[in-house]
Every structure is written in C-alpha cells, then in structure tokens.
Amino acid sequence: MIASPLELIRKTKFTQDAEALFRLMDGRSVSALVIGLPMNMDGTEGPRAQSCRAFARNLERLRPVNVAFWDERLSTSAVERFLIDELDLSRRRRAGVVDRTAAAWILQGALDRLRPST
C-alpha cells in the first residue's frame, strides 16, 4: 500500500471540518483514520497533541470511527527536504504541497509499521 495525498481540509470550525472529513471517508470507504500527533522533541505531548486527541474524541462522538495516532515529529522537515533536494521545487510551489505531502508521509509511516514483515 502506498499513501497518496488527497484533499487538504483547512481547519475552520469543528463541525465543518468533521463534515468534510466524513464526506471524504464515505467517498473512499475509509475504515480508519491516522491522525498525526505533534509530539515534542523529547517525546512528551504538549497542547497541540492534546488538541489532536480532543479532535479525535469529538469525531467519535459524532460517528464511531477507528483512530490511530502517529508521531509526526520532523515529517514536515523531511518532506521539505525531499521537495527541495529531489524535486527542486521553489518555495512558492512547495507551499502548495507541503501539508498534503506531510500527511501522506505520516500515513505511509503508519502503513509501513502495520505491514507484516517478511
């Protein structure tokens, strides 16, 4: 399995964000979500991680959904480095794809971890 970026949902109001997410999930027959967890570099959880966990709890109040959290430390840095080194994208062109590509990076990490080793 290979993760690929779909649609970027910009954070607005929770209800609107949840509706947009559920539409995407329904359109793709999604059975679970992987949510990036912005951990501190020392491995602790700060306010942003707590906000992600609260978002998942609130989603689950609207609809039963399987949620897994994945450490997203350095994902944006890794994607930025890739876009610069491998694709030679300008800063302006990177701005449009970094968030979506970082989300795919996070999902791919989770999928790789779940894949049975051979």
Image (spheres, rainbow, N blue to C red):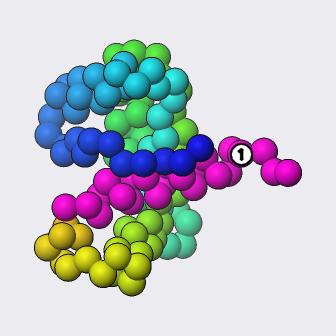
Q: Position of residue 84 (x, y in %)?
A: 33, 81
Query: Which of the 4 image quarters holds residue 9?
Result: top left
**Residue found farthest to the top:** 63
On whether residue 27 falls in the magenta region, the answer is: no
Query: Secondary structure under badge 1?
Result: loop
- In the rendered structure, the answer to whether residue 107 lies left or right of residue 27 reads right
Viewer-nearest residue: 14 or 99: 99
Q: Position of residue 15 (x, y in %)?
A: 20, 25
Asked whether residue 37 appears in the rendered view, the answer is no
The residue tagged 1 is: 115
- In the rendered structure, the answer to whether residue 68 lies left or right of residue 17 reads right
Residue 33 position (above or below residue 50):
above
Point 41% across, 34% down: residue: 56
- Please tell me whether the stretch drawn in magenta is mainly helix, strand or loop: helix
Point 85% across, 51% down: residue: 118
Amino acid beneath label 1: Arg
Q: Which residues are magenta?
A: 96-118
For disc 1, the neighbor class at 10 Å (few under 14, some 14 to 19, many from 20) is few
On whether residue 98 falls in the magenta region, the answer is: yes
Point 29% across, 63% down: residue: 98
